[in-house]
Image (spheres, rainbow, N blue to C red):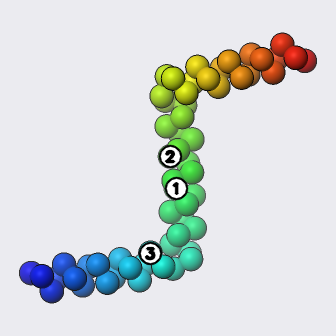
Amino acid sequence: MLESILQVFVTMNGVATSPFVLLVLALIGGYLGSRAVEIIPFTRRIIERREAQAAERE
């Protein structure tokens, strides 16, 4: 069983060091982060305040 676990770690290390996989993970993380900001009420209020201030300046 230990050998199987070690094999998984070695495989994941090889995948994680690939620039293409890291690019895909970065894009997915950016998308999920932007969705989380829209969902969380506290951050939504901050964004609405900034948009209101920008509208007042115009």
> Residue extending furthest right?
58
Question: In the rendered view, does 40 fall on the left or right side of 45?
Answer: left
Farthest residue, direction left: 1
Q: Residues within 10 Å of mark 2 (few under 14, many from 20)?
A: few
Q: Secondary structure at mark 3?
A: helix
The residue under label 3 is: 16
**Residue type (three-letter) at the residue carrying disc 2:** Leu
- Within 10 angstroms of label 1, few (less than 14), some, or many (20 or more) residues? few
Identify which residue is drawn at 26% across, 79% down.
8
Q: CA distance from mark 3 to mark 2?
A: 19 Å
Can you tell which of label 3 and label 2 is closer to the viewer? 3
Q: Nearer the viewer, mark 1 or mark 3?
A: 3
Q: Which residue is mark 1?
A: 28
Q: Which residue is mark 2?
A: 32
Task: Name the amino acid type tagged 1.
Answer: Ile
- Residue 15 appears left or right of 9: right
